[in-house]
Image: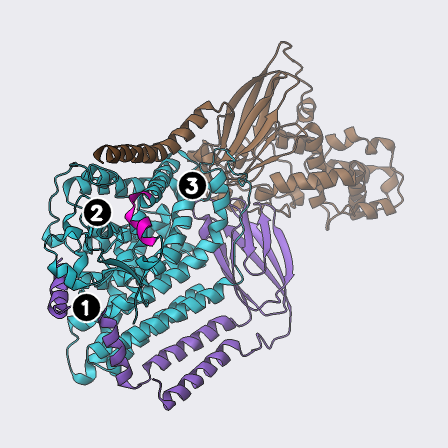
Chain colours: A purple, B cyan, C brown
Amino acid sequence: MLTRNSRWLLIALALTALVIALVPLPATLAQPADRHFRIEASSFEYTPPVIAVNPGDRVTLELVSTDYVHGLYIDGYDLDLTADPGQTARLTFIADKPGAFRFRCSVTCGPLHPFMIGKLNVGVNWLLWRAAGLAVLAATAIAIPRNRATFKDRLRGALSPRPRGPLRVTARTRLESINNCK
Amino acid sequence: MTRFDLTTLPLVKPLLKSRWPQFVIQSIALGGFIFAIFAGLVGTPVGNHNFSIVFVWIAWWALLMLVAVPIFGRGWCSICPIPLPGEWLQRGAALAPQGHGLGLGWRWPNRLRNIWLQNGAFTLVALFSAVVLTQPSVTAIVLAAFLFVALGASLIFERRAFCRYLCPVGGFIGLYSQVAPLEVRVKDTAVCAAHTEKTCYTGNADGYGCPWQVFPGGLVKNTYCGTCVECLRTCPHDNVAINLRPPGADLLRPTGRKLDEAFKAFIMLGSAMAYSAVMLGPWGGIKSAAYSVGSVAWFGYALVFLAFIFGILPGLFLLAVSLGELPASRRPTRKAFISFAYTLVPLGLTAWIAFSLSFVFANISYLWPALSDPLGWGWNLFGTAGVGWTPYLANALPTLQAIVLIGGLIWASATARQIAVELKGGLQQALPVIVFCFAVTLGLLWLLVG
Amino acid sequence: MVASRLNTEFAARVFVLGIALGLPLAALIARLADKTIELRARVAEAGGWTPTDLTVAVGQPLILRLISDDVLHGFALGQSDGPAIDVPPGQAVETTLTFDRPGKYVFYCTRWCGLGHWRMRGTIEVAGTTADSTTGQPPLYVTLGLNIDALHEAAVTPKGAPSATRGAQLGVALPANYLTQDYYRAHSPAEVWQALRAGSFSTELTDDEVWDLVAFVWRSNTTPETLAEAKTLYAQNCAACHGETGAGDGIAAAALRDKAHEAQTEFGHLTQAPADFTNADHMLGASPALLQGKIIRGGMGTGMPYWGPIFTEVQTWALVDYLWTFQFEYK
């Protein structure tokens, strides 16, 4: 059913999608450095809520709880900190995985505890850019004009569930209309 | 576009025709529901260790949004416990018909034969969701309210009036069931035309007339069919089939598209975006505002929320639709607006799936302690009371969410094109709508994956 | 056919009612049959411990189920070496306590849970035949007749932090009476400096070198183990208000300073900014006995808790020893 043109187009689209999704890209051009962050935890937010480092950085987090015992668990890095007010907790790690990672509270601290969330940005969030690129590709691909006949065929197919019998058209529309009154 | 009738498979028809399998599942669901109300009222006030919060907003929601709706459409409705006490009283029986039941049996007023009430109910619950989702006692009250309203509706009105016109969950399940790969349809409409009694609607000794006030013979869309399969039991000509079909088939049917459903699409898409920002975002100020019901901050939050869902999102969409009609110099028709709104059905469904993925998998480990100690009273029924919290799939989730969102964009854009063809507008009519879907997808990607 | 239908209908009704009503009923029955005493923990502003007072007989095991209704709390008995038990929210922890001697025991929360944390205390009344009426010795500040609420500014202060090591290296042979524990506890560093300054053995020394001697005297009255233990006690109990560096800038300090009127409403008296242990004027004019008094008795309307029922005497003196590390260099 596909014409030669649309077949080549499809291949080109698939290749572009693969490139966008898989081509290796450097997460940063900066040299690794020592980074230090003091994060205050209260019910139910972190201050600052978003921290950014470069891949390879040696990151030291200081968790300072201001009201109750809070935790800080980093998705993806599987690291956990717990801090009582008055006892700053410290953790040092190498940010070797690039991307955006949520960190969340790991000690129940009240009703909104499951929504106590912050974000660690390590380098460029290539997943977001790749996804955005694929979204552009998808929208463009679908918006490209193609053979209208193909669409009409598909539309016709979608509208008829193959009823049988001599009264098919009138019976169907009549019965349909019963439900459409409501 | 083939459809495969699942009732031709062995065991399917006997299992559905018999009332017991469905009844057993319904009873278990009802037991769980009542226990959730009980747990919310007398159990621990700590949400993540209370059966009501964990099993309703994490387990059941996961099941609904990730499995039941995308695959079974309104499948949850066939086992939902909320209408059951009222329905059994109304019917006078828990199983097959046997005499009269209670109730006035009034017809639902014509003016209200739409889903606007459901839209309102969902919006109301959504406004208070920060409190509902975290306080067991509030969850219990909301669930009990549903039960009593459904009970009252069954005793005053005929059939499943609550489910069809009042249930906030049913509002969106119905809309999203249009994309499900399962449907209940008749095999041959000629048979229905020749059948004078129409027992699928009026009922007989084998079963009840359609509780959803749908005439099965004329069913062409999933929206209002609750897959309760009463019609399968009452049809004397074995004319009811459960078809496996390509997803999204109902979206392209031009008949039955209405403004209330269009707005339901906006409400759902808008609330998925709002929840992604408020609940999963790093902005604590908004969360506190959403939680402190009654405060000035909360009123501000409520206003912005409502403005976004009922104003900004539909407004931008109207702009997109009218831009699409510009070359032909036509005023944006109500018909175009409503028709194109159905592109937001797959978009909204995938938005909700993407949101639910991170919320559910981050918290599903609470299931184990909640199973063993549902009330936080120190029980250990299954030995898992001490299992600590661990987020699951934390590494894979962002990629999964991106895939789901892009999939939704592709689906919505394809739908937009097909609707444009149907409206005889061509590409220029679909393009601004596709751009709208693209912008929404970018927003959700940034909120969830960024 | 009708009869069998009625039978199945009956069976169906029994089934669904059994599940729907059975589960909550079973839960309620299990609850009522459970005789374990439940001790619920909430932040002080929401009620603290419930119940606050328990009774048990001597030698009888007291089985408690500890549950928190909001945030992470802890449970421990005052003046005891028993370990603290964490009370996580929504999860029950069982513990059994047995008392050998009658009396009034205090239990308290061990994980900081807000400004009212130190108020989360309760009592266990242990009844018994031998009424133990040993009241024990009065605290040292009472014996010495100190007014621990009076100002205690030091007349002279050093330029930098005095170092005990430098003081040791001065090679001064101090008379024995300066090195006794009683002497140390009863005198403030400023007083000891005056005494040492006037002594014949220190004529060659500068003022700051005499301060180093004072630091040396202070260090000789404690051990590294004591300081290590006290460091943990300080971190767990004092740092939230007084600051991890002792500067009176703990995480709760701002609220204590700025929300005095709220504290008045909530707790019945005002609060003020916590003491700054790095302030030489205040600290060097205070004797260890005065500091011990403040810790035991509390602040009388300042927000400073009274730790008398909580810390043992050994622990209290250890804390006092530790507080001087904010003034003196011991390494």
Give whichever of B319, C48 is nearer the camera: B319
Amino acid at the residue labelled 1: Arg
Determine if the magenta segment contains residue B313.
Answer: no
Residue B253: quadrant of the picture = bottom left
Give whichever of B82, C79 is nearer the camera: B82
Tell me which residue sits at (15%, 66%) in the image: A172
| Mark 2, residue position | B162
- In three-dimensional space, the C-alpha distance between marks 1 and 3, rounded to whole angstroms, equals 51 Å
Q: Which secondary structure class fits the magenta region best?
A: helix
Image depth: mark 1 or mark 3 in front:
1
Extreme-bottom residue of the structure: A5
Extreme-front residue of the structure: C1
In the image, is C203 to the left or to the right of A14?
right
The numbered mark 1 sits on a residue in which chain? A
Q: How many marks?
A: 3
Give whichever of C292, B444 is nearer the camera: B444
Tell me which residue sits at (52%, 38%) in the image: B382
Q: Secondary structure at mark 3?
A: helix
| Mark 3, residue position | B51
Amino acid at the residue labelled 3: Phe
Q: Residues within 10 Å of mark 1 (few under 14, many from 20)?
A: few
Q: Residues within 10 Å of mark 3 (few under 14, many from 20)?
A: many
Q: Check the image and report above or below for A20 versus B311.
A: below
